[in-house]
Image (spheres, coloured by chain):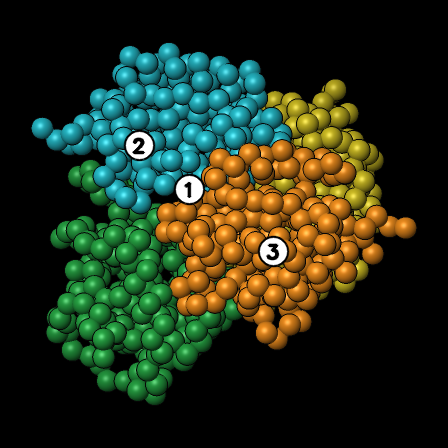
Chain colours: A cyan, B orange, C yellow, D green
Amino acid sequence: MPVSVANSQLVYDAMKGVGVRLVSALPETWLVHLIRIADDDPEMTLVRLAKEEEGVGISAGAHFAGVKSAMLMQNHGFLQAINGIVGVSLLYKIPLLMLITDRGTFGEKDPWQTEGGKYTRPVLDALHIAHDDLSRPDDVEPKMAKAMSLAQSSLSPVALLLQRDLMWEEPK
Amino acid sequence: MPVSVANSQLVYDAMKGVGVRLVSALPETWLVHLIRIADDDPEMTLVRLAKEEEGVGISAGAHFAGVKSAMLMQNHGFLQAINGIVGVSLLYKIPLLMLITDRGTFGEKDPWQTEGGKYTRPVLDALHIAHDDLSRPDDVEPKMAKAMSLAQSSLSPVALLLQRDLMWEEPK
Amino acid sequence: MKRIDCLKAIYPELEDCAVVTIMGAVAAELYSLGHRANFFYLEHAMGLASSIGLGIALSQPNRKVVVIDGDGSVLMNLGGLTTMARSRPKNLVHLIFDNETLLSVGGGAPGGYKWFTTATSTGSDLAGIARAAGYPRAQLVREMEDFEEAALGAINGDELSCVVAKVEAEMPKSFLMDVHMLENRFEFPRALQQPPKDKRELRRPTRITKQQPTTIPALKSLEE
Amino acid sequence: MKRIDCLKAIYPELEDCAVVTIMGAVAAELYSLGHRANFFYLEHAMGLASSIGLGIALSQPNRKVVVIDGDGSVLMNLGGLTTMARSRPKNLVHLIFDNETLLSVGGGAPGGYKWFTTATSTGSDLAGIARAAGYPRAQLVREMEDFEEAALGAINGDELSCVVAKVEAEMPKSFLMDVHMLENRFEFPRALQQPPKDKRELRRPTRITKQQPTTIPALKSLEE
């Protein structure tokens, strides 16, 4: 099965380990197990969105109410959420942990993912959003912890880009 | 009356002069006359949007059908439309003329416009969207013509940033 | 029907709620009735007030959340109505003042609102959309008496409810709000740290009087 | 009801229309019936297929435009339904295949679609939303016979119409499409340069047969 079950569980456990109890999500192939695990976990509130920008508002509300949260989305979902990120997270200084599957990079087979892939990092940089890649299983836990620390101390959005090497297992 | 009627008419005439016959818009204070003039003009199709991203699709459809179009919006509207710009205009190489009121720059009195003002140019640059300012009445016609030329020859989005000095007249 | 009269009618009920408003006229008018630390005014990001309300409602299921929205904002996040209906928080009330225009982003120009009409001016029915999205209750009201009954019923009720109130496209007397966004952003979560009162105590079925409240009562209640 | 059977039923009617589809399963299945230059497959920017259709419909009011949409995409641009209703182009038909899941973005994993359900799986009624948004016609259908009647009536009719067809969440036999996005992006406006046929000629009230068309007939018709 192409999407890595083991590494999805790793990401989920790390996310829960840093205190996340509410997750908003819009599906994409690489997220199938993460969403399934969240849905199965009675300790996690999963909010399925119509579009990604809503998740920025939901995370802000959760933060106001004292609950740590995260957003699960594709890089095109990040691009969809820019106005919310600027008008809520950056304007009001609200922590936001974004887990973004980084489609359209080396190895991509779908032509339509390639344009979003080109612009994800430049747009993150344009907004001065700190980001890092998750590509090796060993990095998942420490990088998740560091990302959450910075989001909380800087009251800012941060992004972890979930890489193909981590999320995808080529069929044997 | 603070929004400049004369300069709004200049912008409108220049836009019509380069062949625009369909305009999509979401209101904002500085656009009041532009939208009013478009609404009053039987030769112009005005589409009032629920949110800006729709305008990217509408402009692509107009282009396919042989009609030149433009989008009228605020810089936060531009930020709202990023996913459409990447997933339609850039991915499919479709010309798109964006007229963006550039709020949140020197002279801004509304605190909530200031964050969007900081990020408009960096995000345009991150997407490699060619842009120029409209701040002097004399520049309006030539810059509009050049913007439309580049949009059509490059099959790309271009942006003209409508500046305070052009759009706003401090009450006497 | 005037928005300010509607706000006056529900103001006393908001004391123990988390209240999230959109920008512009609604925020300024609620503020003019007396700011409270449990009011959050979202001054930008049109459409996301209801999403913020949803995040609060899911995180503090024992607190009543009141979102005070507008037609222009709702239309910018119409899909959010389906997310709301799907999550169906019992503790959330979604009030929408529908003046059929994007008043607060164009009211600066005389008559500007006439050019800034929204789709509700040409037949889009937000209460109908909310019902079709799956809200268990969604009601359109045009008269003060109906608004009071619907809004108070919703606030004191126990299910996700939407009340769409058709109001005049009228500017507030003043847009002045002497609370900075970031100040509001910090005082609001502090207020939400106070445990909500017993829910039974909150359910007052009687119609309230329209007396003007004293200012900043929530700050006082924080000291209790 | 299967999406592919619905597409077969309307395929012969699409010859002179501008057809805009969303990405994924719908695009692949329509392509499998025989690509035509007057079909545009929007492979990304979920939600904007209907906006592209609106731009075409307003620019070429004598051409019938058929948007083939899906529940996930419509939910990403729900406000667009109010824009559509407001513009109310008489020459636009909005078909929505509602399989209650974001199949095409998660079908890669066995059973993945079960985790990728949309709000229509929990009660959101897209036809009801379209009606409340102001579409003069919007109908929900679950059976082939009803789909044919509604879709053919809409395509041969003369007002903005929406047909929401509940279909099985089934993957297409193949996602293979041997037309590049940019190739499609250039052939489509070329096809739209051909004047549409006389409208009366297009209005065939008879029910069509489900025979398989020959491939790429539109390219041939361009040479006529």
- Whether discs 3 and 2 lie on one chain: the answer is no
C-alpha gap between disc 3 and disc 1: 39 Å
Quarter occupied by residue C213: top right
Amino acid carrying mark 1 in the image: Leu
* Front residue of this view, candidates C197 and B61: B61
Whether residue A106 is visible here, answered yes or no, is yes
- Whether marks 3 and 1 lie on the same chain: no
Residue neighbourhood size for the residue with mark 2, other residues' Cα within 10 Å, grouped as few (<14), some (14–19), many (≥20): some
Dot 3 surroundings within 10 Å: few (below 14), some, or many (20 or more)? many
Q: Quadrant of residue B57?
A: bottom left
- Disc 2 is placed on an element classified as loop
Q: Position of residue B159 (x, y in %)?
A: 56, 48
**In this image, C170 relative to A8: left or right?**
right
The disc label shown at residue A105, or none: 2
- Left or right, residue D98 beside residue A143: left
Picture coordinates of residue D101, whole percent (x, y): 29, 48
Pointer 2 chain: A
Subunit that carries the residue with mark 3:
B
User: At 67% from the left edge and 55% from the top edge, which residue is drawn?
Assistant: B140
Q: Residue at x 30, y 29 (%)?
A: A34
Q: Position of residue D99 (x, y in %)?
A: 27, 54
Looking at the image, is mark 2 or mark 1 earlier in the sequence?
1
Q: Which label is found at residue B144?
A: 3
Report helix, strand or loop for mark 1.
loop
Query: Disc 1 designates what residue?
Result: A49
> Mark 3 or mark 2, which is nearer to you?
3
- Type of amino acid at the residue the image marks with label 2: Thr
